[in-house]
Every structure is written in C-alpha cells, then in structure tokens.
Image: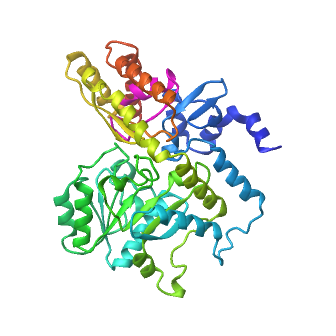
Amino acid sequence: MSILELIEKRLEENFALHEQYLNPQMVRVLKTIGYDRHYVKAQGAYLFDNQGEKYLDLLSGFGVFALGRNHPKIVQALQEVLTAALPNLVQLDASILAGLLAERLAAIAPPGLERVFFANSGTETVEAAIKFSRYATGRSQIVYCQGGYHGLTMGSLSATGDPHYREGFGPFVADFKEIPFGDLAALEKALINQDVAAFITEPIQGHGVRIPEPNYLPAAAALCRRYGTLFVADEVQTGLGRTGKIWAVEHWGVEPDILCVAKALSGGFVPVGAVLCRRWIFDRVFDRMDRSVVHGSTFGKNNLAMAAGIATLQVIEEEKLVERSAVIGQQIIAELQPLVDQYECLQEVRGLGMMMALEFAEPSSWSLKAAWKMLETANKGLFSQLIVVPLFTRHQILSQVSGHGMNIIKFIPPLTLSDEDCRWLVTAVKDVVADAHRFPGAAWEFGKTLASQAIRQKTAQK
C-alpha cells in the first residue's frame, strides 16, 4: 500500500492515533476549541479539509511557511535532489550544497557574519550560539530577557524567560541570568563585571510581539561591545523577511556577532537551522584540525535541507517577498488600527511586516468588566479564545494566542498573502472583535462554556 493510499484509508483516525500514541492533551485542546479538522490539502496560504472548506493560515506553522505551503519551486528543487542519487551525509566530505547555501547566507547576512554552521532547528542554533560564545570569550555567563523564547532543549530553555515552559524542568544550565526586555540599565549592570559571554535576545519578542523602543537594540549592542560580550540575535522567527526586512535587526541598524535563523529557511519542507557568526568566533572554536568536529549535527547538512534553503532564498529574492511583507503588513495594521478607538477591550494593534498582534485588556464598562473578570478568574488569557475560535469556526482563519496566559492574538501569515486574503483577514477581525463586545451574546456564551471547563479542570487537578 502506498503512502497516499494509507493516508486516504485512515485519515479520520488521526485524532484517535494521537490520543493513543502521541499527545492526548493536545487532542483535548483541539476538540475543546473546535479545531478538530481533517486536513487533506495545503497550497500557498490555504488549508483544505475533507469537507471542502478552505482556511486562511495565519499561523503558518509558527512561521515556517513564509513562502506558503507546497511552493512549486521548492518542490522542484527537492524532486531534483531526490532523483539525482547524490551522495548525502558522507560526513568525511565537504558537501557542495552546504557550501552553496552557506555562500548565499553569507551574502545577505548582516556585516561581518562570514561563517555558517548548519543544524536541524532553531533550538539547535541557539545551543550552538551558547557554546560558541562561551568558548570564544572564555566566559560562562549568558544574559537573556524576560518574556523571551529561544527553544525547549536544555540550553535554549535555560535562556527562555517564560516560566510556563520552564516549570518542573530545572535545575537549568548554570550561569544564566534573566533581565527585563528593554531595560538598558539592567543590561549594563549584568555586563559590567565583564564576565558575560553573550547577551541573547529576539529583536522582536515572538511571544507577545513585543517591539523594543527605537534606541534599545543599538544601545544594547554598544554595551556588549564596551564590556566584551557577544551580541546574539535570535532571528529564528523574525528572519528572512518576516518583519519587512531580510533581518529584523536591520530596522535598528544593529550588527550582531552571532545570528540564529531557522523556520522559514526550510521552505516549509525539511527542518534546517543556521548560525551565522563572525569569522574570529568560528575560528576560535574550530582552531585546530583535531577540533574540526568539536561541535556538529549529524543531519545538519543533509542534501534536502540544503536544497530547500537554496531554493527558499531564490524565491524570496525573485518574488520580492521582503518588500511585499513590509507593504502588506503595514496595510493590514493600518486597516485594523481604527478598531482600537471603537472597542474598549482592544488595547493595541502593532507589528512590523507580517508579524502582527492584537492586544486586549480589561474594559471599563461595568457589564464587560464583570464578564472579563469571570473569564480571567477561570483561566488567565481566556478572553483571547473569544477571538481566535470564531476567527476559525466562523471565518475559516487559523491564528494563535501569542503566549500562555496572554490576551494577545498573533498573526504570522505567509509573506505571499494576496490583496483578497488581506480583505478576508480584516473583515473577519472586525466581525469577531465587534461580537466580543456584545454582552450578553453568543461570544460570551461560548466564553462561559470555556470558563466552566477551565474551572472543572483546575478542580480535578487539586
């Protein structure tokens, strides 16, 4: 039986299989909020289910599908590699595809980043950045930001400033220090003893889409230079056009010492990550022939990943997706901005390029305030579900809450959105935000159901 025949035969068993062999709690979440669909096809910015429904994907695999799903040029590149019987992962070899992708990345990298290390994921690139920083500087401390997210393996989790992901997994790697995002005084205090190997931060924090003040990143980079600390930019999600620049650090003219990229580089097919760093850092880590394999990743330079990366960079350039991200993102934000003055729960619409957020806050009117507090008492951040769930069930738009316990909705769509897709998005958001301000109403009845379930779950856990 072929793979396609197997899928067709057992498609509707997907939730049962996950309940039995994978993560039953995730299945419970999907069924509770009405996201339990059987998807059969994906193309560009769209998903299609077995009932013929078409969905606009504003989640894009947490930013993986910057080019949309199943882009034909990426498919072609992978097919060529698969049919060419090329040597792959020889290990004691110098892969031509890895060399070509590294050359292309170095050509578009921020100034001074001339060396490339390949891994399989964003969290692996962060692990490498931590190790490279420590070895190159001879220091052990790593400074990271509260609210930041860098991955879930042990080193990257030690630099992730979100207690939801850290709870129960300690003790963490030694010599990691957390400071508030945007606080230059706290950063200087952490660096002043000149014992910090690296300061790592996302240029824009993905959880919450927190955009720093204009002077923060340039001043942070200057402090790092003053105290001999490496500046590490985690662009796993913000890189390759997501924010309307090829790298988010370009918005502030910052030149990092190390830059981490993944997600979009895959073209949506093969996991890949890359660490771009200054030559002296790389050469200090790999300083002798017997240290040539002191850090590595078995599958990091595999042919499919390298081909996907090369094709992805070609598509981004040919289709001018960085420029399109800037224009379309600005257009969407401009059309949604007036809602802030119209609806009391909507506090802010913000973003750069195709990285956007709607932030909600407690209203002032008595009826909505009481309803809001009911939801927040049951489970912090529950109001957000009154937005993302009807976006999905009523408007066929897949989106996400921006982080645990947050009333922030995040949109990170493909950079290929059409004008029609933008109208679809804006129309839908206007409808669900308006509906969430009608009390009593259908949205709040759904909210009561969610609150009751949350309370029952808390009770059961005691």
- Where on the picture, by quarter, is residue 443? top left
Residues in magenta?
Answer: 384-408
| Residue farthest to the right, as pictured | 1
Which quadrant is home to the C terminus? Answer: top left
Image height check: is 217 above or below 461? below
Say if residue 82 shows up in the picture.
yes
Image side of residue 42 versus residue 156, left or right: right
Residue that appears at 52% across and 47% down: 64
Image height check: is 80 above or below 289? above
Nearest the eye: 122 or 374 = 122
Image side of residue 341 versus residue 103, left or right: left
Say if residue 170 shows up in the picture.
no
- Where on the picture, by quarter, is residue 340? top left
Nearest the eye: 346 or 336 = 336
**429 falls in the magenta region:** no
**401 falls in the magenta region:** yes
Image height check: is 146 above or below 352? below
Measuring from the top left, give residue 377's x and y in whole percent. 29, 30
Residue that appears at 64% across and 71% down: 95
Measuring from the top left, give residue 336's x and y in whole percent. 35, 28
